[in-house]
Image (cartoon, rainbow, N blue to C red):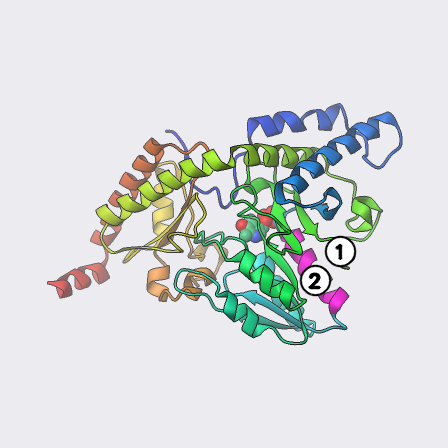
Amino acid sequence: MELIYLDNAATTRTDERVVEAMLPYFTQYYGNASTIYALGEESRKAVTRARDIIAAGIGAKPEEIYFTAGGSESDNWALKATAEAYKEKGKHIITSKIEHHAILHTCEWLERQGFEVTYLDVDENGCINPADVEAAIRPDTILISIMFANNEIGTIEPIAEIGAIARAHGVLFHTDAVQAFGQEPIQVDEMNIDMLSSSGHKLNGPKGIGFLYIRKGVKIRSFVHGGAQERKRRAGTENVPGIVGFGKAAELAFASMEERTARERELRDYMISRFEKEIPYVKINGDREHRLANNVNACFRFVEGESMLIMLDMKGICASSGSACTSGSLDPSHVLLAIGLPHEIAHGSLRLTLGADTTKEQIDTTVDAIKEIVAHLRSMSPLYEDFVKNQQ
Ligand SMILES: *Cc1c(COP(=O)(O)O)cnc(C)c1O
C-alpha cells in the first residue's frame, strides 16, 4: 500500500538533498565550530553559509539570525526575553487566540509572572483585524506577537499592516512564521517585523533546528546561558549538521517557492471543490483567499475527526484532526473554537496539508476514501438519522 502523507503542517519528510548536504558534517567535518584549527573552520564556514542563505531569504542581515533548537524554543525566547528586557517599560503583551501553543502556553506562564496578556479575537475565517491590534495597544504594551500563518486552518494574517501599527506605536513586533517561512514571501524590513520564529522540519529540513530573527537594536538577552555561541545570545555547541540541513532546505524552498506553491494551490483548490461538490454538510475552515497554498481544513458534520483519522490510517493516509482526544483532552481545537464553531462541529474536523510531492492521484484517492468513511460513519449515527428525518 502506498503511503499518502498529508500532514505536512505537523512535519515534513527531510529532502534527500538536505540529508546529503548534512552527512559530511557528522563524520568528516565534525569539528566544533568555535575552535581555531582547520577542522573547526570547515564547520564555521558551513554555519556562515547557512546563515547567509536564511538571512537573504527574509531580507535580514546574517548577524540578525540566531540558530535555536526549533520553533518552540524561538517562540519561548522571543516572548520571555522581551518580557524580561522591557519589564521596566511595561508588562502588557498582545497576541491572538489562535496562536500555536508554543506562544499561548508561554503567555500563560508570563501571566503567572505578573504580565498581562490580551488575546485578540479573530473573525470567522481566522483573520485578525489590524484595527483590533491598534485598539489593544496601551502605554505599557511592550510586545505584539501574531503568527504569520495559522498551522491548523492555514489563514495568513495581515502581517505588514500589523507591523506598521506596531512600529507607529513604538511596540516590538514578533511573528511566529513557522508555517510561512519558505512558503510565503517574507521581508522583515518592509513588514516591520522585529523578531521572527522558524523551524527546519516544517520545510523539508531536519527536526530540532530553528532560528529566531532578532532585529539589530532589540535588546533581548540570552535565553540559554553558557558559552559565547551565536554572538553570546544562544549558548550551546552549534548543531552544525542541523544548521547545514536547515540552510539547504531554505535554499531549496526559496528556489522552488513560486512554482511549488502554485502547484499546491491548484491541488488544494481541487480537493476543496471535490469536498464541496461530493460530500453533503461539509464546511471548509479558514480564509479562502489569504490561505497557505498547502492547507485544507474541513469539518464533516456528524462524524468524529478521530474516527476519520483511524480509518484513513488503515488506508495508508496520514492526516490530522482538530480534536485532541489523543492528548487526553476532549476539547476541540482552540483555533476552531476561536473562529466560532460549535463543539459538535469542531469535533468533526480534518486537516490535510499537502507537500511538494503530493500528486493529483493521491488527492483523488484521499477524497474517495473520505467520502466513503464519512458516509459509513454517518450511516451509524443516530444524530445524523434524526437530522435527515427532520430535513424531510
Ligand atoms: C510546528 C510549529 C511550532 C513548533 O515548532 P517546533 O520546531 O516543532 O518546536 C510553532 N509554531 C507553529 C505555527 C508551528 O506550526
Q: Secondary structure at mark 2?
A: helix
The amino acid sitting under disc 1 is Phe
Task: Determine which quarter of the picture holds residue 159.
Answer: bottom right
| Residue bounds of the magenta highlight | 72-86
Badge 1 crowding class, 10 Å Cα cut-off, few under 14, some 14 to 19, many 20 or more, is some
Residue 355 showing in the rendered view: no
Would you place residue 151 above or below residue 202 in this image? Answer: below
* Contact check, label 1 and label 2, Cβ < 8 Å: yes
* CB at disc 1 and ligand 1 closer than 8 Å: no
Residue 210 spot, x, y in % from top left? 65, 45
Q: Is residue 139 left or right of residue 295?
A: right
Would you place residue 52 above or below residue 140 in this image? Answer: above
Task: Determine which quarter of the picture holds residue 118.
Answer: bottom right
Q: Is residue 73 magenta?
A: yes
Would you place residue 342 above or below residue 351 in this image? Answer: below
The amino acid sitting under disc 2 is Lys
Residue 91 spot, x, y in % from top left? 69, 73
Residue indicated by mark 2: 80
**In the image shown, does 381 or 184 lie closer to the viewer?**
184
The total number of labels drawn is 2
**In the image shown, does 173 or 169 lie closer to the viewer?**
169
Q: Residue furthest right?
A: 36
Residue indicated by mark 1: 223
Task: Determine which quarter of the picture holds residue 49.
Answer: top right
Dominant SS in magenta: helix
